[in-house]
Amino acid sequence: MNVMSNDLKTLIPDTQKFLRQEMKQFIGGEWVASSNSDSFSVIDPSSAEVLAQVPKGNAEDIDAAVQAANTAFNDPLWRDMPPANREKLMHRFADLIEGHAEELGQLEALDVGMPSFIGQHVEVGNVLDTLRYMAGWPTKINGRTMNIGEPMPEKRFFAYTCREPVGVVGAIVPWNVPLMIAMWKIAPALATGCTIVIKPSEVTPLATLRLAELAVDAGIPAGVINVVNGLGHEAGQALVEHPLVNKISFTGSAVTGKAINRTATETLKNVTLELGGKSPVILLDDANLDKAVQGISMGIFGNTGQVCVAGSRLYIQRGIFDKAVDRLTKEARSLKVGPGLHPETKIGPLVSEAHRDKVMGLIEAGVKAGGEVVTGGSQIDGPGYYVEPTVLINPPQSSQVVQEEIFGPVITAIPFDDIDEAAALANDTTYGLSSYVWSKDIQRVHQLVPKIRAGQVYVNSSPFPHPAMPMGGYRQSGIGRDLGEEAINHYTEHKSVVIGIN
Ligand code: NAD
């Protein structure tokens, strides 16, 4: 089977104009040439063609960006800005992003490979929801007055706490939904009065660069949002090491997260880690099978499985195993695979050749371990990096394909007999990011939810990160939370003030 590549002639003029411009670093509110002439190529995964050359920043570029962020942090213009004005700026930023949603969606379609409709409406939709949700926070970040009694004879005190921004934040972002994850870091930074240096993934940096430009157009002061492109072990490492960076907010793989945590210990930074997952889906025999199959399919094949919360391990109650596998197989075969800009595409390519090869290697390992491919299982010929949506039944629970994050359109299916066995299988992993339960039986649902060791449990739903709901994982899926009030807590310090008043 052959699959088309993106037709760049269908891009809107704004996207074409952005792609024609010379990519630089975005520091202190303007495009700045990198300190060196090295660059890397950004590739369209539907065609393997080069989309843009982006500068390969190093420690010097990171230092320039951190200095700009530190200056902006200490500037009364930002530091003393009334919270209601910060809120207004955030709404203005959101309105501007909304006006450029099609352009940003197309950049994500080209860079990541996702359908541009999903980029524009789902990813940019979440970016807007997150920014507007967080815009409600600046006016509500308060301390408390505390009754500390009279701890010393005849001495009286007035005591209170206040909340202050943590300072300069270093944000390190992965390639799978780059704009959305960048906004999960930017929005709480803006809400709390922090400033930020973002190091996008070297695989998909384009939309984040455009976002930084829009922030300045919206009136966000220069230096509040900075973007430095570069490789992880160079620019990323320099950001984690920089002594003026007070917090690292990282989203990416567990391997990188552990390395970053070790490096950040040197300067004892506040660290949030949003890492990988191997999320279980428990399908009980009373579930509405039509809805469940659609939700399960969307939860693993959406964004070609390149989703941290992808429901990649399906556990089906034995009595409905064959029927459920059959339905899921039909659903997987119905999904149109193609380039992101094509209006009928449901499943795009994987992000790179190396990633496609990794996914294929894990499918092959699953078959060698005893799994049976009931649909998919092959890469698709052509210049792009396509893999068929794949359903693999009965691999051993201990096999690599069940235990390791694949980050591709591959779901394993294994039967279980009762709720306790389902919970034990679900928890049998080093991760604990998301989980899914499909059932109409409220009692069995409530028996299962407390048994599952994961940061999210979706019941009768595929995943959707809502900005009010904290997002993060148990165990090796991370430390801390993005989104929700929890993110505001992670971006602020608590100061205790005790005043003797006699
Ligand atoms: P990755 O860990 O390879 O890279 C993530 C980022 O870290 C990139 O910007 C990279 O340049 C940078 N980096 C790499 N080495 C570094 C170092 N030594 N120091 C500093 N920075 C470094 O991850 P990826 O392949 O880009 O993304 C996929 C992973 O992200 C998956 O594991 C996925 O589950 C995870 N993810 C998690 C969430 C979540 O919310 N928990 C969301 C999306 C993706």
Image (spheres, rainbow, N blue to C red):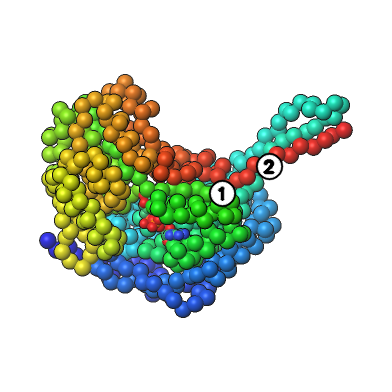
> Is 278 on the left-hand or right-hand side of 136?
left
- Mark nearer the viewer, 1 or 2: 1
**Residue placed under numbered mark 1 in the picture:** 270
- Foreground: 364 or 45? 364
Disc 1 packing (10 Å; few <14; some 14–19; many ≥20) = some
Assign the N terminus to one quadrant of the image.
Answer: bottom left
| Residue under the image location 44 percent in, 52 percent down | 257
Q: Residue furthest top?
A: 443
**Residue placed under numbered mark 2 in the picture:** 495
| Residue under the image location 49 percent in, 62 percent down | 237
Amino acid under disc 1: Asn
Q: Measuring from the top left, give residue 262's x and y in whole percent.
A: 50, 53
Specify whether residue 203 is in view. Answer: yes
Q: Who comes first in sequence, dot 1 or dot 2?
A: 1
Determine the secondary structure under disc 1: strand
- Does residue 189 lie above or below 44 as drawn? above
- Foreground: 439 or 410? 410
Say if disc 1 is inside 8 Å of ligand 1: no
Assign the C terminus to one quadrant of the image.
Answer: top right
Question: How many numbered marks, from 0 up?
Answer: 2
